[in-house]
C-alpha cells in the first residue's frame, strides 16, 4: 500500500500551507495509516473584546471520531490570570481497580478512532474473550504476562493488529480478559480465527485440559461500528469492583496503539468564540458553573464540530 500525503481540509488563505500538510506515518504492511497529531490552524479577524484579557484558544477534534477538546493558553499572565495550581505530583502509587478517570481515558482513546478510515480499508473488528480453567492464577500481573504472550503469538500467526484489552474478574474470582481487536482482512474467516485464538491461549496458559482448549475462549465478529462502541462501553469500560487490597496494576491498555487510525485537527479561535464553544461543550458534558477552565474534553462527533466552527466563521473545507 502506497503512502500518500494527508492534507487537512482547506482553510483561509492566511494559513501557512506548510502547517496544513504533514506526512502521516504508515506502518509497513498494515491496512490503514497511523496519523500523527498534525495541526491545521485557521486564522481570522477577531472581534474586539471589551476586556484587556488576552490568550490563545484552540479547538481540537479527532477526525472521523467522537472526541473534541477546547484548551485555553495564556499569552500574558498579568492580564489574564488562570489558577495554575498543580495537583498530585511525586511517585505514583499502586493502581487498584478501575477508577472513573481511567474509564474516561479508555473511552476517550476509543472515541478518537477514525471510523471512516477503518471502514475504507475494509478492516475487521473481533471481540475475543479469554478465561482460565478451574485452576487459575491469583496474581493479576502474571495474568497480564499471559495476555502479552498470547497477543504476540497471534501477531506471529496473523500479522500486525491493534487492540484494546481489559482485565476483569469473574464471580468465581478468576481473572479474565475482554479484547476489541482491529485486524486486517488477512485474518481470514471467523471459524479460522476462533481456532487460532483458542490454541494460542491454550498454549500460553499451560495446556491444562482439552476442555479448556474448547471452552477457554470465545470470539465474535463486530460487523458495525455501533456494535464496537456498545462492546467498549459494556465490557471494556465496565465499572467493576475488585477484591479489596488486591494490587491489580493497570486493568486496561492498548496493543500496537500506533496502528489505530487517529488524526487530530486543531483550529485557533478567538477568545470571544471560545467562550461560546465552552458554553456549548458544558451543555454537552452536562457540567455546571462558569469558573475558569484550562482544558475541556467532550464526546462529540467530528462533523458536528466542523459545523459549529463553520457557523462561527472558521472554514475547514
Image (cartoon, rainbow, N blue to C red):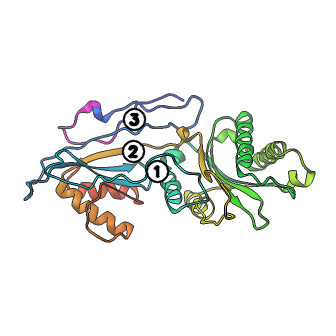
Q: Residue at x 48, y 29 (%)?
A: 3
Asked if one can make out residue 317 in the rendered structure from this viewpoint, the answer is: no
Q: Quadrant location of residue 204?
A: top right
Label 2 environment density (alpha carbons within 10 Å; few <14, some 14–19, many ≥20): many
C-alpha separation, residue under disc 3 versus residue under disc 1: 17 Å
Badge 3: residue crowd in 10 Å (few <14, some 14–19, many ≥20): some
Whole-percent x, y for residue 94 in the image: 59, 51
Sequence order check, earlier mark of 3 and 1: 3
Q: Which residue is mark 3?
A: 6
Left or right of 33? Residue 20 is left
Residues at circles 1 and 2 in contact by the CB criterion of under 8 Å: yes
**As displayed, is residue 120 above or below residue 133?**
above
The residue identified by callout 1 is 112
Q: CA distance from mark 2 to mark 3?
A: 12 Å
Q: Which residues are magenta?
A: 8-18
Label whose residue precedes the other's in the sequence (1 or 2): 1
- Tell me, yes or no, whether the highlighted magenta stretch contains residue 173: no
Query: Would you say the magenta stretch is mainly helix, strand or loop?
Result: loop
Tell me which residue sits at (54%, 48%) in the image: 119
* Farthest right residue in view: 210
Residue carrying label 2: 264
Measured from the top left, where is residue 78 in percent x and y?
14, 49
Classify residue 297 by image quadrant.
bottom left
Which quadrant of the view contains residue 278?
bottom left
Q: Secondary structure at mark 1?
A: loop
Question: Are circles 3 and 1 on residues that touch, CB within 8 Å?
Answer: no
* Residue nearest the viewer, comparing 142 with 45: 142
Does residue 39 lie above or below 54 as drawn?
Answer: above
Give the distance between the C-alpha atoms of the residues marked 1 and 2, in whole angstroms. 8 Å
Amino acid at each position: 500500500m502506497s503512502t500518500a500525503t494527508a492534507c487537512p481540509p482547506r482553510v483561509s488563505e492566511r494559513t501557512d500551507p506548510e502547517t496544513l500538510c504533514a506526512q502521516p506515518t504508515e506502518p509497513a504492511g498494515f491496512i490503514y495509516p497511523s496519523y500523527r497529531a498534525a495541526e491545521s490552524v485557521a486564522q481570522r479577524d477577531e472581534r474586539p473584546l471589551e476586556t484587556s484579557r488576552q490568550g490563545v484558544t484552540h479547538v481540537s477534534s479527532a477526525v472521523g471520531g467522537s472526541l473534541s477538546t477546547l484548551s485555553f493558553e495564556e499569552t500574558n499572565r498579568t492580564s489574564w490570570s488562570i489558577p495554575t495550581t498543580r495537583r498530585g505530583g511525586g511517585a505514583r502509587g499502586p493502581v487498584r481497580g478501575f477508577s472513573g478517570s481511567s474509564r474516561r481515558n479508555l473511552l476517550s482513546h476509543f472515541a478518537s478512532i477514525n471510523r471512516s478510515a477503518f471502514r475504507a480499508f475494509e478492516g475487521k473488528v473481533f471481540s475475543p474473550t479469554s478465561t482460565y480453567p478451574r485452576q487459575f492464577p491469583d496474581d493479576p500481573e502474571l495474568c497480564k504476562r499471559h495476555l502479552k504472550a498470547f497477543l504476540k503469538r497471534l501477531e506471529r500467526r496473523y500479522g500486525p493488529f491493534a487492540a484494546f484489552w481489559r482485565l476483569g474478574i469473574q464471580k468465581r474470582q478468576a481473572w479474565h480478559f475482554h479484547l476489541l481487536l482491529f485486524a486486517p482482512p488477512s485474518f481470514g474467516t471467523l471459524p479460522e480465527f476462533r481456532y487460532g485464538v483458542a490454541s494460542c491461549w491454550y498454549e500460553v496458559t499451560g495446556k491444562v485440559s482439552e476442555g479448556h482448549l474448547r471452552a477457554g475462549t470465545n470470539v465474535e465478529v463486530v460487523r458495525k461500528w455501533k456494535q464496537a462502541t456498545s462492546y467498549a462501553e459494556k465490557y471494556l469500560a465496565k465499572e467493576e469492583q475488585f477484591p479489596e487490597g488486591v494490587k491489580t496494576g493497570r486493568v486496561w491498555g492498548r496493543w500496537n496503539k500506533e496502528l489505530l487510525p487517529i488524526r487530530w485537527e486543531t483550529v485557533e479561535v478567538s477568545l470571544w468564540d471560545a467562550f461560546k464553544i465552552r458554553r456549548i461543550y458544558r451543555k454537552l458534558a452536562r457540567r455546571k458553573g462558569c469558573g475558569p477552565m484550562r482544558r475541556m474534553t467532550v464526546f462529540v462527533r467530528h462533523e458536528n464540530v466542523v459545523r459549529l466552527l463553520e457557523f462561527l466563521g472558521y472554514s475547514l473545507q
